[in-house]
Amino acid sequence: MRKYLIIVSVILAAALCTCVFAATLTHKSIDIESGVSVYVDGEKLNPSDVNGNAVDVFTSGGTTYLPARAISEALGCKIDWNDAEARVDITTDSGKTADAVSGATQTQPAGKKILVAYFSREGSSYPQEGVDTITSASLPVGNTKLLAEHINSMVGGDLFQIVTEEPYPGNYIETTEKAQTEKEQNARPALSTHVDNMDEYDVIFIGYPTWWSSVPMPIYSFLEEYDLSGKTVIPFRTHHEGSVGTPDNSEIKALCPNSNVLTGISVPGSKVDSSDDAVRDWLDGLDY
Ligand SMILES: Cc1cc2nc3c(=O)[nH]c(=O)nc-3n(C[C@H](O)[C@H](O)[C@H](O)COP(=O)(O)O)c2cc1C
Protein backbone atom coordinates (compact mmCIF):
# COMPACT_ATOMS: atom_id res chain seq x y z
CA MET A 1 0.00 0.00 0.00
CA ARG A 2 2.81 2.39 0.82
CA LYS A 3 4.27 1.69 -2.60
CA TYR A 4 0.89 2.51 -4.12
CA LEU A 5 0.77 5.83 -2.31
CA ILE A 6 4.30 6.77 -3.21
CA ILE A 7 3.46 6.06 -6.83
CA VAL A 8 0.33 8.18 -6.58
CA SER A 9 2.40 11.05 -5.22
CA VAL A 10 4.81 10.71 -8.10
CA ILE A 11 1.97 10.65 -10.57
CA LEU A 12 0.71 13.88 -9.11
CA ALA A 13 4.12 15.45 -9.36
CA ALA A 14 4.24 14.39 -12.97
CA ALA A 15 0.71 15.56 -13.61
CA LEU A 16 1.39 18.95 -12.08
CA CYS A 17 4.49 19.32 -14.16
CA THR A 18 2.43 18.59 -17.26
CA CYS A 19 -0.03 21.33 -16.26
CA VAL A 20 2.65 23.93 -15.75
CA PHE A 21 4.28 23.13 -19.07
CA ALA A 22 0.97 23.13 -20.91
CA ALA A 23 -0.34 26.26 -19.26
CA THR A 24 2.73 28.36 -19.93
CA LEU A 25 3.77 26.70 -23.22
CA THR A 26 7.36 26.77 -22.06
CA HIS A 27 9.88 24.68 -23.92
CA LYS A 28 12.77 23.45 -21.87
CA SER A 29 15.76 21.30 -22.57
CA ILE A 30 16.40 18.88 -19.76
CA ASP A 31 18.88 16.10 -19.12
CA ILE A 32 17.17 12.81 -18.53
CA GLU A 33 18.13 9.33 -17.45
CA SER A 34 15.82 6.93 -19.27
CA GLY A 35 15.24 3.23 -18.85
CA VAL A 36 13.42 3.46 -15.53
CA SER A 37 11.20 0.42 -14.88
CA VAL A 38 7.85 0.60 -13.14
CA TYR A 39 6.26 -2.29 -11.26
CA VAL A 40 2.70 -2.21 -9.97
CA ASP A 41 2.00 -4.83 -7.29
CA GLY A 42 5.09 -6.71 -8.44
CA GLU A 43 4.17 -6.76 -12.13
CA LYS A 44 6.21 -4.88 -14.69
CA LEU A 45 4.28 -2.16 -16.47
CA ASN A 46 4.94 -1.25 -20.09
CA PRO A 47 3.41 2.22 -20.17
CA SER A 48 1.74 3.38 -23.37
CA ASP A 49 -0.15 6.50 -24.43
CA VAL A 50 -3.80 6.74 -25.43
CA ASN A 51 -2.89 5.43 -28.94
CA GLY A 52 -1.01 2.43 -27.59
CA ASN A 53 2.46 3.83 -28.31
CA ALA A 54 5.18 3.08 -25.76
CA VAL A 55 5.97 5.99 -23.45
CA ASP A 56 9.31 6.64 -21.85
CA VAL A 57 9.78 6.77 -18.10
CA PHE A 58 12.72 8.87 -17.01
CA THR A 59 14.44 10.67 -14.20
CA SER A 60 15.52 14.29 -14.37
CA GLY A 61 16.95 16.48 -11.65
CA GLY A 62 16.17 13.86 -9.02
CA THR A 63 12.49 13.53 -9.99
CA THR A 64 11.06 10.47 -11.72
CA TYR A 65 8.48 11.37 -14.37
CA LEU A 66 5.78 8.78 -14.98
CA PRO A 67 3.06 8.93 -17.65
CA ALA A 68 0.01 9.87 -15.64
CA ARG A 69 -2.55 8.08 -17.86
CA ALA A 70 -0.73 4.74 -17.97
CA ILE A 71 0.01 4.72 -14.27
CA SER A 72 -3.47 5.84 -13.23
CA GLU A 73 -5.11 3.17 -15.36
CA ALA A 74 -2.74 0.51 -14.02
CA LEU A 75 -3.84 1.49 -10.52
CA GLY A 76 -7.51 1.39 -11.49
CA CYS A 77 -7.94 5.15 -11.30
CA LYS A 78 -9.96 7.23 -13.73
CA ILE A 79 -8.02 10.01 -15.39
CA ASP A 80 -9.27 13.03 -17.32
CA TRP A 81 -7.39 15.74 -19.13
CA ASN A 82 -9.05 19.17 -19.13
CA ASP A 83 -7.55 21.07 -22.02
CA ALA A 84 -9.13 24.44 -21.21
CA GLU A 85 -7.70 24.47 -17.69
CA ALA A 86 -4.57 22.48 -18.53
CA ARG A 87 -5.52 20.19 -15.68
CA VAL A 88 -5.32 16.50 -14.88
CA ASP A 89 -8.03 14.93 -12.70
CA ILE A 90 -7.25 11.55 -11.19
CA THR A 91 -10.11 9.81 -9.41
CA THR A 92 -9.64 6.79 -7.15
CA ASP A 93 -12.28 4.11 -6.79
CA SER A 94 -13.43 5.69 -3.54
CA GLY A 95 -14.45 8.71 -5.55
CA LYS A 96 -11.85 11.01 -4.03
CA THR A 97 -9.15 12.73 -6.02
CA ALA A 98 -5.77 11.16 -5.49
CA ASP A 99 -4.29 14.15 -3.70
CA ALA A 100 -7.00 13.86 -1.06
CA VAL A 101 -5.80 10.38 -0.12
CA SER A 102 -2.11 10.69 -0.82
CA GLY A 103 -1.35 11.34 2.85
CA ALA A 104 -3.33 8.35 4.04
CA THR A 105 -1.47 5.28 5.18
CA GLN A 106 -4.55 3.15 5.61
CA THR A 107 -7.13 2.09 3.09
CA GLN A 108 -10.39 3.90 3.37
CA PRO A 109 -13.42 1.61 3.12
CA ALA A 110 -14.41 1.65 -0.55
CA GLY A 111 -17.16 4.11 -1.36
CA LYS A 112 -17.52 5.38 2.22
CA LYS A 113 -17.26 9.06 2.95
CA ILE A 114 -15.65 9.89 6.27
CA LEU A 115 -15.91 12.95 8.49
CA VAL A 116 -13.45 13.51 11.33
CA ALA A 117 -15.17 16.06 13.58
CA TYR A 118 -13.57 17.25 16.80
CA PHE A 119 -13.87 19.75 19.60
CA SER A 120 -10.64 21.00 21.15
CA ARG A 121 -9.54 23.90 23.30
CA GLU A 122 -6.37 25.83 22.68
CA GLY A 123 -5.90 27.23 26.18
CA SER A 124 -3.88 25.75 29.03
CA SER A 125 -4.74 22.25 30.19
CA TYR A 126 -3.68 20.24 33.18
CA PRO A 127 -1.11 18.81 33.20
CA GLN A 128 0.82 20.24 30.28
CA GLU A 129 4.58 20.38 30.48
CA GLY A 130 5.90 23.88 29.98
CA VAL A 131 2.46 25.45 30.13
CA ASP A 132 1.29 27.51 33.08
CA THR A 133 -2.05 25.98 34.02
CA ILE A 134 -3.05 28.81 36.31
CA THR A 135 -2.42 31.75 34.00
CA SER A 136 -3.89 31.95 30.53
CA ALA A 137 -0.78 30.64 28.81
CA SER A 138 -1.98 28.99 25.63
CA LEU A 139 -1.10 25.81 23.86
CA PRO A 140 -0.70 26.56 20.17
CA VAL A 141 -2.84 23.55 19.27
CA GLY A 142 -5.24 21.54 21.40
CA ASN A 143 -4.48 17.87 22.11
CA THR A 144 -7.69 16.62 20.53
CA LYS A 145 -7.09 18.68 17.42
CA LEU A 146 -3.69 16.97 17.07
CA LEU A 147 -5.24 13.55 17.55
CA ALA A 148 -7.96 14.37 15.00
CA GLU A 149 -5.29 15.34 12.48
CA HIS A 150 -3.41 12.07 13.09
CA ILE A 151 -6.58 10.03 12.65
CA ASN A 152 -7.61 11.93 9.55
CA SER A 153 -4.22 11.39 7.95
CA MET A 154 -4.78 7.65 8.40
CA VAL A 155 -8.39 7.41 7.22
CA GLY A 156 -8.42 10.06 4.49
CA GLY A 157 -11.57 11.86 5.60
CA ASP A 158 -12.68 15.46 5.86
CA LEU A 159 -11.54 17.29 8.99
CA PHE A 160 -14.09 19.47 10.78
CA GLN A 161 -13.61 21.58 13.91
CA ILE A 162 -16.57 22.06 16.22
CA VAL A 163 -16.35 25.65 17.49
CA THR A 164 -18.57 27.29 20.09
CA GLU A 165 -19.93 30.80 19.49
CA GLU A 166 -18.68 31.78 22.93
CA PRO A 167 -15.03 30.75 23.33
CA TYR A 168 -13.90 28.96 26.47
CA PRO A 169 -11.41 30.85 28.68
CA GLY A 170 -7.73 30.27 28.01
CA ASN A 171 -7.39 29.80 31.77
CA TYR A 172 -7.75 26.16 32.82
CA ILE A 173 -9.48 26.74 36.18
CA GLU A 174 -12.02 29.13 34.65
CA THR A 175 -12.74 26.58 31.93
CA THR A 176 -13.32 23.81 34.46
CA GLU A 177 -15.83 26.04 36.26
CA LYS A 178 -17.65 26.97 33.06
CA ALA A 179 -17.70 23.33 31.94
CA GLN A 180 -19.06 22.23 35.30
CA THR A 181 -21.86 24.79 35.16
CA GLU A 182 -22.76 23.72 31.63
CA LYS A 183 -22.88 20.08 32.74
CA GLU A 184 -25.08 20.86 35.76
CA GLN A 185 -27.42 22.91 33.60
CA ASN A 186 -27.43 20.32 30.81
CA ALA A 187 -26.59 23.23 28.52
CA ARG A 188 -26.27 23.12 24.74
CA PRO A 189 -23.62 25.76 23.89
CA ALA A 190 -24.34 27.42 20.54
CA LEU A 191 -21.96 26.41 17.78
CA SER A 192 -20.50 28.67 15.12
CA THR A 193 -19.44 25.91 12.71
CA HIS A 194 -21.83 23.55 10.95
CA VAL A 195 -21.58 20.64 8.52
CA ASP A 196 -23.67 21.56 5.47
CA ASN A 197 -23.45 18.14 3.82
CA MET A 198 -23.80 15.72 6.71
CA ASP A 199 -26.12 13.55 4.59
CA GLU A 200 -23.14 12.65 2.40
CA TYR A 201 -21.11 11.07 5.20
CA ASP A 202 -21.29 7.38 6.09
CA VAL A 203 -18.76 7.37 8.93
CA ILE A 204 -18.33 10.09 11.53
CA PHE A 205 -15.35 10.09 13.85
CA ILE A 206 -16.18 12.34 16.80
CA GLY A 207 -13.36 13.63 19.00
CA TYR A 208 -13.35 15.54 22.27
CA PRO A 209 -11.32 16.17 25.43
CA THR A 210 -12.55 14.48 28.60
CA TRP A 211 -14.24 17.11 30.73
CA TRP A 212 -15.26 16.17 34.25
CA SER A 213 -14.95 12.48 33.35
CA SER A 214 -17.49 12.89 30.60
CA VAL A 215 -18.31 14.41 27.23
CA PRO A 216 -18.15 18.24 26.87
CA MET A 217 -21.53 19.84 26.23
CA PRO A 218 -20.57 21.27 22.79
CA ILE A 219 -20.46 17.63 21.63
CA TYR A 220 -24.09 17.30 22.76
CA SER A 221 -24.90 20.41 20.69
CA PHE A 222 -23.13 18.95 17.69
CA LEU A 223 -24.53 15.41 17.78
CA GLU A 224 -28.09 16.62 18.38
CA GLU A 225 -27.91 19.00 15.42
CA TYR A 226 -27.86 16.22 12.81
CA ASP A 227 -29.78 13.08 11.98
CA LEU A 228 -27.07 10.44 12.22
CA SER A 229 -29.44 7.48 11.86
CA GLY A 230 -27.84 4.57 10.06
CA LYS A 231 -24.39 6.15 10.12
CA THR A 232 -21.34 4.73 11.83
CA VAL A 233 -20.10 6.90 14.70
CA ILE A 234 -16.61 6.35 16.13
CA PRO A 235 -15.57 8.31 19.26
CA PHE A 236 -12.03 9.32 20.17
CA ARG A 237 -10.97 11.41 23.11
CA THR A 238 -7.98 12.77 24.99
CA HIS A 239 -7.58 12.93 28.74
CA HIS A 240 -4.95 14.00 31.24
CA GLU A 241 -3.52 10.77 32.57
CA GLY A 242 -3.33 7.01 32.32
CA SER A 243 -2.51 4.86 29.34
CA VAL A 244 -4.15 4.60 25.96
CA GLY A 245 -7.48 2.93 26.54
CA THR A 246 -11.08 2.42 25.61
CA PRO A 247 -13.48 5.17 26.61
CA ASP A 248 -16.91 4.46 27.96
CA ASN A 249 -19.13 4.97 24.91
CA SER A 250 -22.41 5.10 26.80
CA GLU A 251 -22.85 8.87 26.53
CA ILE A 252 -22.15 8.89 22.79
CA LYS A 253 -24.47 5.90 22.30
CA ALA A 254 -27.24 7.71 24.13
CA LEU A 255 -26.70 10.75 21.89
CA CYS A 256 -26.73 8.63 18.71
CA PRO A 257 -29.39 5.98 19.47
CA ASN A 258 -29.90 5.07 15.82
CA SER A 259 -26.25 4.98 14.82
CA ASN A 260 -23.76 2.16 14.84
CA VAL A 261 -21.40 3.43 17.57
CA LEU A 262 -18.08 1.59 17.44
CA THR A 263 -15.42 1.20 20.12
CA GLY A 264 -13.53 4.42 20.64
CA ILE A 265 -10.03 5.26 21.78
CA SER A 266 -8.80 7.41 24.66
CA VAL A 267 -5.31 8.90 24.47
CA PRO A 268 -3.51 10.97 27.15
CA GLY A 269 -3.14 14.50 25.81
CA SER A 270 0.60 14.51 26.44
CA LYS A 271 1.05 11.28 24.44
CA VAL A 272 -0.88 12.17 21.29
CA ASP A 273 2.32 12.64 19.29
CA SER A 274 3.60 9.18 20.21
CA SER A 275 0.30 7.35 19.84
CA ASP A 276 0.37 6.57 16.11
CA ASP A 277 0.92 2.81 16.57
CA ALA A 278 -1.88 2.52 19.12
CA VAL A 279 -4.19 4.59 16.91
CA ARG A 280 -3.36 2.47 13.88
CA ASP A 281 -4.00 -0.78 15.83
CA TRP A 282 -7.32 0.61 16.99
CA LEU A 283 -8.34 1.62 13.45
CA ASP A 284 -7.26 -1.76 12.09
CA GLY A 285 -9.52 -3.47 14.62
CA LEU A 286 -12.60 -1.47 13.65
CA ASP A 287 -15.12 -2.79 11.17
CA TYR A 288 -16.40 0.34 9.42
C1 LIG B 1 -12.87 21.62 31.82
C2 LIG B 1 -11.88 20.51 31.85
C3 LIG B 1 -12.15 19.32 32.52
C4 LIG B 1 -11.27 18.24 32.48
N1 LIG B 1 -11.62 17.09 33.10
C5 LIG B 1 -10.80 16.01 32.96
C6 LIG B 1 -11.16 14.76 33.54
O1 LIG B 1 -12.19 14.61 34.19
N2 LIG B 1 -10.32 13.70 33.37
C7 LIG B 1 -9.17 13.80 32.65
O2 LIG B 1 -8.46 12.80 32.48
N3 LIG B 1 -8.81 14.99 32.07
C8 LIG B 1 -9.59 16.08 32.22
N4 LIG B 1 -9.23 17.26 31.65
C9 LIG B 1 -7.99 17.33 30.87
C10 LIG B 1 -8.28 17.24 29.37
O3 LIG B 1 -9.17 16.19 29.08
C11 LIG B 1 -7.00 16.98 28.58
O4 LIG B 1 -6.02 17.91 28.93
C12 LIG B 1 -7.28 17.02 27.10
O5 LIG B 1 -6.20 16.40 26.42
C13 LIG B 1 -7.46 18.43 26.58
O6 LIG B 1 -7.72 18.38 25.21
P1 LIG B 1 -7.71 19.70 24.27
O7 LIG B 1 -6.32 20.26 24.34
O8 LIG B 1 -8.04 19.19 22.91
O9 LIG B 1 -8.76 20.60 24.80
C14 LIG B 1 -10.07 18.36 31.74
C15 LIG B 1 -9.75 19.58 31.12
C16 LIG B 1 -10.64 20.63 31.16
C17 LIG B 1 -10.30 21.91 30.45
Image (cartoon, rainbow, N blue to C red):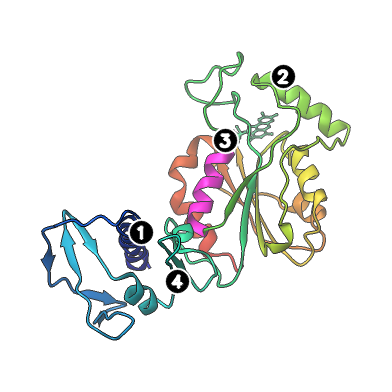
Residue labelled with disc 2: 174
Quadrant for residue 191, please give it.
Answer: top right
Say which mark, if any, is on residue 170.
Answer: none
Real-space Cα distance between discs 1 and 4?
A: 12 Å
Which callout, 3 or 2, points at the residue further toward the start of the chain? 2
Quarter of the image with the C terminus is bottom right
Q: Is residue 262 left or right of residue 108?
A: right
Quarter of the image with the N terminus is bottom left
Q: Residue at image x 61%, y 60%?
A: 114
10 Å crowding of disc 4: few (<14), some (14-19), many (20+): few
Residue labelled with disc 4: 80
Which callout, 1 or 2, points at the residue further toward the start of the chain? 1
Question: Which label lies toward us, 1 or 2?
Answer: 1
Ligand 1 is located in which of the four quadrants? top right
Which range is magenta? 144-155
SS at mark 2 in the image:
helix
10 Å crowding of disc 1: few (<14), some (14-19), many (20+): some
Q: Is residue 259 magenta?
A: no
Which callout, 1 or 4, points at the residue further toward the start of the chain? 1
Amino acid type of the residue tagged 2 in the rendering: Glu
Residue 126 in percent (x, y) is at 59, 26
Real-space Cα distance between discs 4 and 3?
A: 50 Å
SS at mark 4 in the image:
strand
